[in-house]
Image (cartoon, rainbow, N blue to C red):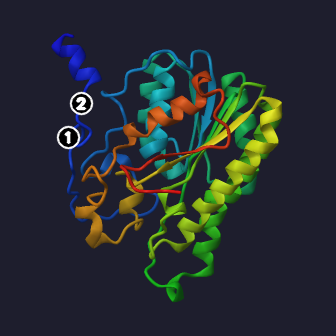
């Protein structure tokens, strides 16, 4: 085995990515990957495709940054065309991902819009089909996470907004997508280790992630006879802009992810292969599964 091949295929997971100690920082919600320190690895240089999604057409929400951006890059390098949903304030990040997709010779469609707007979320699948010519992968990934340390301080407005973006929008988008999805299509929902091990300061966020698990398993039972597979990915602590837009207490940022068995936070690119697997024909007998990618944190 050559030294070059060895570097690509064999690595120590503890040291493959830096054990970061992010400086205390803040961005107003929703934030930009462009301004995140240190910059996350979304696979720009590190993800290599093998054609597993050749000719496929995907809609990804929250696709401008973090895990969603890493999935979009990976899908394009696996041969898929991608429609990207994101908030209008995130346009600068979305343009970067669009350019990366187009450099792979794939089509990228930009669909800015707030998923809390019911009309926006319902219209996304139709717009994705218009831009891509069809749809056979739906990734419900967008999420809202705001840390509040006491229930008495957790206002109804935040709870309602978190549920609207994180889980209720999944109902609206998926319902609107079903008329477009042929047999062989896949739906992948982003849940979290928070569904199993909720942090005291993320009560509303963790509750939505547990709901996503139930939604995934129930919908999988409905759609499997139609040849549409539904699964979920549950990330652990992953370094994304979500953490610095009040997703974590500021004083905890320098130690973010240090409590995993690997001693570090995950990078968005480390989540991408899980989504590629669940989207591809390689997972044809995987239905209603929640695939945990969390650095070793125990889950049921």
Does the residue at mark 2 contact the one at mark 1 (Cβ under 8 Å)?
yes
- Can residue 102 be seen from the camera position used here? yes
Would you say 111 lies left or right of 239 here?
Answer: right
Q: Which residue lies furthest to the bottom in this view?
A: 152
- Determine which quarter of the picture holds residue 287: top right
The residue at the point 62 percent across, 76 percent down is 157
Asked whether 33 or 67 is in front, the reply is 67
The residue at the point 42 percent across, 57 percent down is 242
The residue at the point 56 percent across, 53 percent down is 191
- Give the answer, above or below, for where 248 lies relative to 94: below
What's the mark number on residue 15? 1
Asked whether 53 or 143 is in front, the reply is 53
Residue 180 in percent (x, y) is at: 79, 31
- Give the answer, above or below, for where 137 lies relative to 36: above
Would you say 18 lies left or right of 149 here?
Answer: left
Residue 297 in percent (x, y) is at: 40, 56
Residue 181 in percent (x, y) is at: 76, 30
Name the secondary structure under disc 2: loop
Question: Crowding near pointer 1: few (<14 within 10 Å), some, many (20+)?
Answer: few
Asked whether 106 or 243 is in front, the reply is 243
User: Which residue position holds label 2?
Assistant: 11
CA distance for labels 2 and 1: 8 Å
Name the secondary structure under disc 1: loop
């Amino acid at each position: 085995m050559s030294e070059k091949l060895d570097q690509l295929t064999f690595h120590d997971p503890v040291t493959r990515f830096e054990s970061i100690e992010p400086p205390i920082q803040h961005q107003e919600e929703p934030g930009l990957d462009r301004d995140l320190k240190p910059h996350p690895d979304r696979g720009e240089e590190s993800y290599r495709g093998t054609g597993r999604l050749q000719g496929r057409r995907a809609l990804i929400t929250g696709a401008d940054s973090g895990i969603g951006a890493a999935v979009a890059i990976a899908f394009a390098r696996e041969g898929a065309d991608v429609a990207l949903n994101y908030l209008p304030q995130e346009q600068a990040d979305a343009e970067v991902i669009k350019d990366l997709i187009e450099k792979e010779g794939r089509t990228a469609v930009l669909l800015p819009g707030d998923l809390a707007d019911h009309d926006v979320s319902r219209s996304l699948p139709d717009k994705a089909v218009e831009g891509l010519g069809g749809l056979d992968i739906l990734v419900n990934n967008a999420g809202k996470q705001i840390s509040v340390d006491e229930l008495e301080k957790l206002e109804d407005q935040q709870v309602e907004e978190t549920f609207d973006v994180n889980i209720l929008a999944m109902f609206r988008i998926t319902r609107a997508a079903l008329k477009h999805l042929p047999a062989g299509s896949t739906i992948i929902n982003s849940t979290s280790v928070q569904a199993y091990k909720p942090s005291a300061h993320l009560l509303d966020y963790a509750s939505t992630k547990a709901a996503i698990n139930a939604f995934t398993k129930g919908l999988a039972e409905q759609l499997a006879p139609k040849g549409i597979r539904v699964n979920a990915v549950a990330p652990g602590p992953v370094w994304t802009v979500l953490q610095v837009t009040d997703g974590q207490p500021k004083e905890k940022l320098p130690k973010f992810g240090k409590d995993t068995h690997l001693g570090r936070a995950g990078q968005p690119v480390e989540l991408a292969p899980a989504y590629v697997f669940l989207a591809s024909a390689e997972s044809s007998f995987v239905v209603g599964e929640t695939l945990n990618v969390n650095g070793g944190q125990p889950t049921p």
